[in-house]
Amino acid sequence: MALFDMPLAEMRAYRPERAEPADFDAFWRSTLDQAAGHDLAAEFRPYDAALTEVEVYDASFAGWGGHRISGWFIVPKHAAGPVPCVMHYIGYGGGRGTPHDHLVWPASGRAVFVVDTRGQGATSGNNAGATADPDGGVHPQSPGFMTRGILAPEHYYYRRVFTDAVRAVDAAKSHPAVDPGRVYVSGGSQGGGITTAVAGLRGDVAAALVDVPFLTHFRRALEITNDDPYQEIVRFLKTQRNADEQVFRTLSYFDGQHFAARAACPALYSVALMDQTCPPSTVFASYNHWAHPEKSIEIYPWNGHEGGSAEHRSVQLRWLKGVGGV
Amino acid sequence: MALFDMPLAEMRAYRPERAEPADFDAFWRSTLDQAAGHDLAAEFRPYDAALTEVEVYDASFAGWGGHRISGWFIVPKHAAGPVPCVMHYIGYGGGRGTPHDHLVWPASGRAVFVVDTRGQGATSGNNAGATADPDGGVHPQSPGFMTRGILAPEHYYYRRVFTDAVRAVDAAKSHPAVDPGRVYVSGGSQGGGITTAVAGLRGDVAAALVDVPFLTHFRRALEITNDDPYQEIVRFLKTQRNADEQVFRTLSYFDGQHFAARAACPALYSVALMDQTCPPSTVFASYNHWAHPEKSIEIYPWNGHEGGSAEHRSVQLRWLKGVGGV
Amino acid sequence: MALFDMPLAEMRAYRPERAEPADFDAFWRSTLDQAAGHDLAAEFRPYDAALTEVEVYDASFAGWGGHRISGWFIVPKHAAGPVPCVMHYIGYGGGRGTPHDHLVWPASGRAVFVVDTRGQGATSGNNAGATADPDGGVHPQSPGFMTRGILAPEHYYYRRVFTDAVRAVDAAKSHPAVDPGRVYVSGGSQGGGITTAVAGLRGDVAAALVDVPFLTHFRRALEITNDDPYQEIVRFLKTQRNADEQVFRTLSYFDGQHFAARAACPALYSVALMDQTCPPSTVFASYNHWAHPEKSIEIYPWNGHEGGSAEHRSVQLRWLKGVGGV
Amino acid sequence: MALFDMPLAEMRAYRPERAEPADFDAFWRSTLDQAAGHDLAAEFRPYDAALTEVEVYDASFAGWGGHRISGWFIVPKHAAGPVPCVMHYIGYGGGRGTPHDHLVWPASGRAVFVVDTRGQGATSGNNAGATADPDGGVHPQSPGFMTRGILAPEHYYYRRVFTDAVRAVDAAKSHPAVDPGRVYVSGGSQGGGITTAVAGLRGDVAAALVDVPFLTHFRRALEITNDDPYQEIVRFLKTQRNADEQVFRTLSYFDGQHFAARAACPALYSVALMDQTCPPSTVFASYNHWAHPEKSIEIYPWNGHEGGSAEHRSVQLRWLKGVGGV
Amino acid sequence: MALFDMPLAEMRAYRPERAEPADFDAFWRSTLDQAAGHDLAAEFRPYDAALTEVEVYDASFAGWGGHRISGWFIVPKHAAGPVPCVMHYIGYGGGRGTPHDHLVWPASGRAVFVVDTRGQGATSGNNAGATADPDGGVHPQSPGFMTRGILAPEHYYYRRVFTDAVRAVDAAKSHPAVDPGRVYVSGGSQGGGITTAVAGLRGDVAAALVDVPFLTHFRRALEITNDDPYQEIVRFLKTQRNADEQVFRTLSYFDGQHFAARAACPALYSVALMDQTCPPSTVFASYNHWAHPEKSIEIYPWNGHEGGSAEHRSVQLRWLKGVGGV
Amino acid sequence: MALFDMPLAEMRAYRPERAEPADFDAFWRSTLDQAAGHDLAAEFRPYDAALTEVEVYDASFAGWGGHRISGWFIVPKHAAGPVPCVMHYIGYGGGRGTPHDHLVWPASGRAVFVVDTRGQGATSGNNAGATADPDGGVHPQSPGFMTRGILAPEHYYYRRVFTDAVRAVDAAKSHPAVDPGRVYVSGGSQGGGITTAVAGLRGDVAAALVDVPFLTHFRRALEITNDDPYQEIVRFLKTQRNADEQVFRTLSYFDGQHFAARAACPALYSVALMDQTCPPSTVFASYNHWAHPEKSIEIYPWNGHEGGSAEHRSVQLRWLKGVGGV
C-alpha cells in the first residue's frame, strides 16, 4: 500500500479549523441528561469462562433509552484491593467477543470493562456482540451503521453509542473492585473514536489510549479514502443526492476533533501512515486538537489500519506506568 | 459466468419438501390482524413531476406498527373510468426512486403503485427511498437488512416488510381510479419475494408477476451462492456461531415456497440460469410449488440476475392481456 | 470512491487551450456532404409494444455510407398538433433497447427519437441494438469501438457515428408529428459526446442536454483514469507503440471541446465529481468552452459515472420548460 | 487454480456426438472457391531485423475478399536447399509481433511463416499486428472478435480468418526456400483452433501441432468457463436474448471437432488440466475426434492456459523429428 | 462462501487409503536421532512484558541442525507447584508475536510454550517471529515456505519444522514449572499440522488440540482449492513441470494422515465447512485416521478458515478438563 | 493505468541525493574478494535442444560461497572466430527457462549467456530455474526473496546474487568462442538491477542494456507503488515493526543508483511511464546518475512494466551496432 495522504511533516502540524456547531455542548449536555433519566442498573453476573486466574462477569447496564448494553468485566483474581480499570471500546462491526480475547489488562493487574457497541457484533471476522440497537431510525439507511439516523443529530446512531460509552464508565466505577480514580478509556478505530468522545464528555477519566481513531474529520475522510466504513456515508450520499448539507450538519456533532479539543486527560495515540480506513491526516487532526498537554503519538510508518496491533500493547503498558499506572 | 446450479431438466422437476412450521398460517393471521389495528390512513398527495400524460401522487399509508410507508401512485391521464393497477415491489437496497422510473404500466393504460421497502433506498446504484424502519430489532445485526431481528420471527425485518406490502394493496384499492378486481402484484428479486408473499397472504389479487425471486428456499441458497444479499445471513452465522437453528426457524416463516403453495392467482415467473444472486433452483422450487394451475415461467439461459430486464416487460405485457388485462 | 481529479474551484475555471486542426470545419463539412449523397430514406414502421398511451415506431434512416440506422420513435397518443422532439443518443456499449425504456419524454408530452449507435448494443448489462457498422476499418483494433479506424480521421469509427447522429435529426424533423423548431439533443456518457458533436455541427437544434460526456479532452482523460472505455485507447497504444502521434491527430477531429466551442444553442450539463469513466475536469473543459451563453451545469459531488441518474431527469424537465418547453 | 472439469480418465474417453450441419463441406468448399477468385499475390519483402543468421521477409498475400494479410517469413541463412516450413497461427488478441519472437523454428533449420489474424494485434500484452478486417459485419457485436458477424455463418469473422489461414499455406509453398511436402501447421489457443481448421480443410499439410486449442465444442465451453474470450459470446447472448439458436447454428460451421474429424495428417496436441480459457474436456473432444491415427497428446496437469509454454517447444521439436522432420 | 467440498455425511465417513512410504518410520527415527546429536540447550530468559500476573520468558533451544528456535514461555504467577503446559504451534506466515497474544492458557492456570516456526513471522497481518531457517535448500523454490527443499524429503522445509516442534516439547518439559505428565500440543492451520506431527512422533503428550489442520492429504487439497498456501505447491509445479512425481514422494513423508494414524493421545479437532484454505474433507481424512479412540470434532458449518476462533477456545477449555485438565 | 508518478519533464531532471554508505566500495571489494576464494570452475556441457543453427551448452560455475550457478550458453553455429557475448540476467521469479527462449542474440551473430538467479525459477508464469540459494539467512523472511537476510548487508540475498552475476562474466569470458573485449550486460526489471550492479562493479564490460530496472531508489519505490516485489519489503516492515532503520541501511548497499554512479561503459535504458512495478522516477534516478557520458533512454509513454517488450529488442540491436556491435 503506497503512501496516499499528506507528507508526514505536514501532518505533524495539521490542525484544521474546526467548524463546531454553536450548540455542541448543549446538545451533548441535554443528551446525557436525557439518558440520566434511566437508572444505570449495572449488573455483574459471574460467568464461567473456565479461567482460574481472573474473575469474569457478564456485565450490563442501561444505556441510551434505558436499553441494556452488554459487556465483559474481568478482574485479576489475586488483586489486593481496588485496581485501575481500562474501558475498552470496540472496532466497527465487532462485539465484545469472548472473555478470552481480553486478558492483557487483567494480566497486568488491571480490570477491563469491554463495552459492546449496540447493534454490532454480527459480522464475519469480528467477535460476536450481544447488544441490540432497538432504535431503527426515522429514514432509510445504507447497509451498515454509519447512516442510521444520519439526517438529524437527535436520531444519529452514534448519539446512542457515545451515550452508552459514557455511561459504561459509571457502570465500571460502580463496581467495588475498581479504583474510581484510575479509570482509563481505550479503543482502536471506531473504539478510538468512542474513546475520544468519552474523554471529551467526561472530566474524570485518568488517561486515554486512542488507536487509529475513526469518526474524525469526516469530510476529508470521505474525500480521500475509498474504504469502508467511511464509504457507507458516500454511498448514502450517492443515492440520497440532496441530503448532503443535512448529513454534514449531523456529523458536526460527532467529529472526534471537537471532543479532542475538550479532553482533560493525558493521551497516547497511535497512527499508521498507510491506513486507508482511518487516513493518518484525520488522526493527526484529532491528536493536534487534543487539549491536555500530556500527549504523545506513536507512528507506524509502514502499516495500514492494523497499526501497531499487539506490539502497540507493550507501548501502552509502558506509557500507562508513567502516567500513573499500577 | 458458467452454469453452477442443477441441470435445467432437473430444475424443471425440482419440488423440494417444504418444512413449514405448524403455526405458519396462525403467525401470519395474527401478524396481519395486529397491523389491522392501525388505521390504513392512505394519502395521495399530487406531485409535480413535470409530466403531462400521467397523474403522479406521492402516496403513503400506515404499514406495520402504523409506520408511514411511502410510494408513488401514477395513473394515466386520459383514462376513462377505473383502470387496473400494478403493485410494484422493489429489489434489495432500492427505494421507490423517481416517478420517471415507473412509466411503463401507465403507458399501457394501467395505474402503478410503487411501494417503498422500509429502511431501504439509500444505497449506491439504486433509487432513493423515503421510508424508515423505526424498529431496530432486539439483537445485533450484520450490515444490511437480511439479519435485522433474525433471531425470532416476531422481530424479523421481513415480517414488517411483507405486512407493509399486503396493506399497500388495500391502499391501492382505496383509490377511486383503481378497478379493485384487477390489482396485480409484481416485482423482481426482493420485489419478487415480496410479490410471492402478498399473493400467498391475500386471496384477492388478480395475477402475479414474479421475476428472479429472492427470499426463497433459504438453506439451499445459503449453501450454493457466494453472493449478497443471501451472504449477509452467512456472515451473521459466521460470527453468531450458535444462532444457526434459531435463524432457520425464523426463516421458515418467510420462505417463498410456503407462500407460493398458497397462491390463488395466475403467475408469470422469470428465471435466469446464470443467476448467482437468486440461484435458479430456488426459483424453480417456488414456481413448482405455486398452487394456481395457470402459471408459466420464462427462462433466460445466458443471463445472470439481470434476467430478462426490459425485454421481459414485453413478455409481461402480452401475458397480462391473456390473463384479463386492459 | 475518493476524489481524484482537480479541486472543484479549479475545474470551474478550467478552460484548456484547444489544439484544433486547421481543417476541422472542412473535414466535417466534407464528411456531411459526402453522407448527404445518400438519400435519407427515413422510415417509421408502427411497432406493437403493447402500450396504449403512446405510439411507437420502429424507425430507420440512411446514415453514413447509406447504412441503415435503427431507432425508436415514440409519440404521446393524445397530442394535439406537432410536439417537441428529444433526440436521445446512447451510452457506450448499449443499443436502443426496448421502447419501454424510453417513456419519460412521451409522458411529458414530447416525442423521443432514440438513435442506435452503429455496431453497439450487444454487451451484457446494456440494451440490445439493431444496427451494424459494416465498415471494419483498415488496420487492427483493440476490442471495443474506440480504436476502430483510429489511425486516420477518415476511417475513425466516430466519424460514422457522429454523421449518423447528425442525420438522425433530419429523420426526426421529417416526421409530421414533430415541431421542427423544437428539436433537442440529449445523451449521457458516449451519448453526451454525440450530443455535443451534433450541437456543434448543426445550427438548428433548440437545446442540448449533456450528461457526464465522453469523447472529450482525450489526452487528459487517458492520463488520469484507469477506466474503460478511454483505456481501450491506452491498450491500443501499449501494443501499437509507434502509433501515438497518429492517434492523437485523429482524435483532434473528434474532441468534444471543439464541438462545444461551436455550439449555438442553450445547454444543460451534468457532471459527477467521483466519475472515473468521464473525469470531471474533462467535462468542465467541454462546458467551459460551450459557446452559447445560456448554459448551466448541475454538479453531483458524491457520484461516480452514474451522475444524477433518474433524479437528473427532473432537473432536465424543469430546465427545458424555462428554455422553451412544451 | 483447482481442477474444475471432468476427471482425467473420463476426458481421455470423451468423444461427444458431433452435431455437424449437413452442408458443412459445401459451405467450406464454396467459401474457399470464392476466395480463390482473388489472385494470391504473395509478396516477400526483405526486412532488416538486424539479424545475421536468418533471412527475414515482411510477407503478405490476398486472403478472404482479396484483403492483404501480413506475416513474417523467416528462413535460416545457412540452409542448403529447400527447408520444411512451420505455419504459425496466433493466439487471441495478438498479432505477428516482431521477427525476434519467432526464432525457434529457424534455429532448428526450418522456415517459419507467422500469419497475422485479421483485425487483431492491438491489445495490451500481445504483440502488434498489421492486418485489418475491413468487413465490419451486418449487425451489432460485443467488443472483441468472437461475435463479429455471429448471426450467420456467411458473415462470421472466423470464416474470413480460417480462409486467410488456408491461403497462407499456399503463400508459404510459393516461396522457393520451402519444401512444399513438409509444411506443418501450428498454434496455441486461437492459433490451435485455426491449426485444426487448416488441417481439416487441406489434405496436404504434413503434420499439425495443436496446443490448448480454442474454438472447439462451443456450447460446453460457454457453459463451464467464466473466462474470455468464450465469454464474449455469453455477453452477446445476455443482451441479444433471442439470438441463441442462430448463434449456435453459426458456430456449428466453425467447431474444431468437425475439422479434427477430417484431419488427414499426424498431430501432436497439448492440454492443460487447469485451463479455464480452453477447458480440457473441449480439447480432448477435439483430440479424440482427430481422424488420423498417428496422434498423441501431452498433458500438463498443473497448468492453466499457459500449458507447456516454452518447455513444450522441446517436445514438439523431438516429435517432429519422428514424424518426418529435418 | 458457498459449500464446495463433499457433503458433510460423506466427509464424516471419509477415510481415504493412505499411501505411506515403506520407510516412513525409519525416516523420522533417523531424522530425530540426527537432531538429538545437538544438545537441547534450552534457555529461559526472563522478559519484561509489563505484566504482573504472569511470568514471561524469552525461551529458546536447539532445533534441527542445532539452530536456535525462539518461543515464549509464560507461566501463571500464582501457581503452586508444577502446572500443565500447552505447546502452541503457529499458523502459516506468523511468528510467536508478543506475549500479550498468548494469555488464555496462563489465565486458566496452565503454562504455555509458544514455538516459533523457523523462517516465518515476517508477513503482514501476522505476528513477528524471531527464528531463522538457515537452510536455504538445494534447488529453486516458489515464494513462501511450502516448496523449500520440496524435491527430496531430506531437504524439505517441514522436516526441520517438525523436528523443531518435537524438540520444543523436551524444552518445555525441562522447565521446573511444568508438570511433564500433562503436556498438551495445540495449533490451528499450519499449527494444527505441526500438532498432528508431534502427536504422531512422540508417545508422551497428554492430549492434542487440532484446529483446521494444514499439511494433510496434499493431493486432494491441491486439486480442490485455489487458496494459498497449498497453491504455492501448484505454482511450483506449473513452472517445474517435470517435478510432479518427486514432489508427491516428498510430501508422502509429511502428510498429517500418517501422523494421525500413529497418535497415542486423545484429540479434539475443529473443522469449518466453508474453509477453502484447509478443505474440510482433508481435515476429516486426518481426524478419521486418528488412532486414539478418545477423540471428537467440533464442526463450524458456516465458517471459513477462521473456524471457531476465540469461541472455540471455550470448547477446548471445557474439553481439556474432561481429559485430565487442571 | 493512469499516470501516477512525477511529470515526465521533472523526471528527466530527477537526480536525487544519494545516501551512499561510506564503506560501500570496501563492502563490495571484500565481497568479491571473498567469492574469489572459490575457484570459478566454469563448465560448459553440450545440450541437445534439437536446434541445428546454434550450439547450446548447459553452463555452470561457482558463484558466491562456491555454490553452483546454472545458465545457458548459446553460440551461433556458423560463426567464424570469437563473437561478442551478451550476458542476460533474469526478471524476478524467473529462471533461465529453455534455450528456445533465448535465440535473439545468437540470431544476430552474438553469443548469449543466460544466468540463473539463485533460488528463483519456480513461480507460475515464469521460466524454470535450476539453481539453489543454499543460504537461508539468519532471521525470518517474508515470502519471496526480497527480504531474505535483509537485516544485514552481509546476509542480504542480493549480495549473493550480484556476486554470482559478476562472476558469470568471468565464466563467459573463459569460453573460447567469446571475444572478451565485447561482453555486454543486459536484463529487464530484476535483471536490469543486476545489470546495473555488474556494470558498476566491473570496469570491463563493453555496454549495458538496462530495461525498467528494479532494485533502485528503494525508499521512494516503497512509498509510491503498491506492487510486488517492492511490496515484499513493506510487508516485512509491517510485521517487523522495529526493523525499519536496519532494513534501509542494508538496502543502501544495493541501490542501483550507487552502481550507476560508478558505471564505466555506455548504456541504453528503457523506461515505461505507467510502470507501477518499477516506477519511472526510480528508473530516471538510476539513469540520471549513470556515470558514462554515452547513454540514452527509450521512453514508452503508455506502457506498464512490460515496457518495450520484443519491440525494444530492435532498438537494442540497432543501438549496439552504433556502440561497437558485430
Image (spheres, coloured by chain):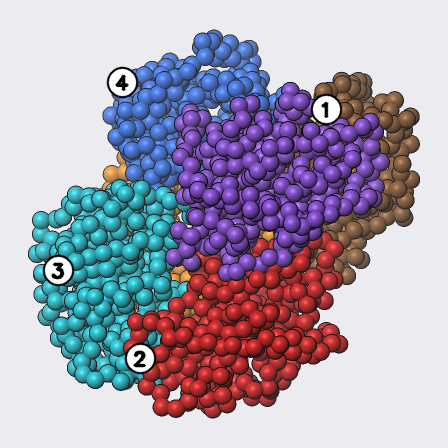
Chain colours: A blue, B brown, C purple, D red, E orange, F cyan
Residue receiving disc 1: C326
Kind of residue sitting beneath label 3: Ala
Asked where in the image residue F6 lies, by quadrant, the reply is top left
Query: Please, what secondary structure does the residue beneath circle 1 have?
Result: loop
Rendered location of residue A297, percent (x, y): 29, 29
Kindly indicate whether the residues beneath marks 1 and 2 are on one polypeptide chain. no
Query: Please, what secondary structure does the residue beneath circle 4 have?
Result: loop
Asked where in the image residue A287 lies, by quadrant, the reply is top left
Residue receiving disc 2: D53
User: Real-space Cα distance between discs 3 and 1?
Assistant: 79 Å
Rendered location of residue F234, percent (x, y): 31, 47
Rendered location of residue A158, percent (x, y): 51, 23
**Residue in the image at 78% along x and 33% along y:** C177
Kind of residue sitting beneath label 1: Val
Residue receiving disc 4: A293
Task: Report the chain holding disc 3.
Answer: F
User: Real-space Cα distance between discs 1 and 2?
Assistant: 77 Å
User: Real-space Cα distance between discs 4 and 1?
Assistant: 67 Å
Asked if one can make out residue B309 in the rendered structure from this viewpoint, the answer is no
Query: Please, what secondary structure does the residue beneath circle 3 have?
Result: loop
